[in-house]
């Protein structure tokens, strides 16, 4: 039995595929430690800046990017 994904599930699935592609590219070029570290830093950056949280006032990124620059 095949289940049809909702539009939101399809969107999330596409992002997971893109993350996998990016992760594979980072690991291939710079190694596992870099790939894992970069993804962890990205998650931390999102968590600390309340990305997508209208109450946090940082829905557009709120200042410095991942590189530390605005």
Image (cartoon, rainbow, N blue to C red):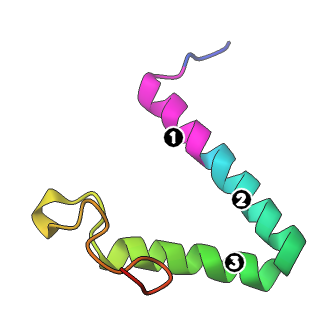
Q: Earlier in the sequence, mark 3 or mark 1?
A: 1
Distance CA(mark 2)–CA(mark 3):
11 Å
Q: Residue 10: x and y, percent?
A: 53, 29
Q: What span is in magenta?
A: 5-15
Distance CA(mark 3)–CA(mark 1):
20 Å
Q: Secondary structure at mark 1?
A: helix
Measuring 57% from the left and 45% from the top, which residue is drawn there?
Answer: 15
Q: Earlier in the sequence, mark 1 or mark 2?
A: 1
Measuring 65% from the left and 83% from the top, which residue is drawn there?
Answer: 37
User: Can see residue 18?
Assistant: yes
Residue 12, numbered circle: 1
The residue beneath circle 2 is 22
Q: Secondary structure at mark 3?
A: helix
Task: Assign the N terminus to one quadrant of the image.
Answer: top right
Residue 23 vs 49, above or below: the answer is: above
Residue 36, numbered circle: 3
Closest to the observer, 63 or 21: 63
Magenta highlight: main SS? helix
């Amino acid at each position: 039995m095949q289940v049809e994904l909702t539009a939101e599930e399809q969107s999330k699935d596409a992002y997971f595929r893109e993350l996998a592609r990016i992760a594979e590219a980072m690991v291939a070029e710079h190694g596992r430690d870099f790939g894992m570290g970069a993804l962890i830093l990205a998650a931390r950056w999102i968590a600390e800046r309340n990305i997508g949280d209208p109450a946090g006032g940082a829905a557009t990124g709120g200042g410095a990017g991942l590189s530390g620059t605005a």
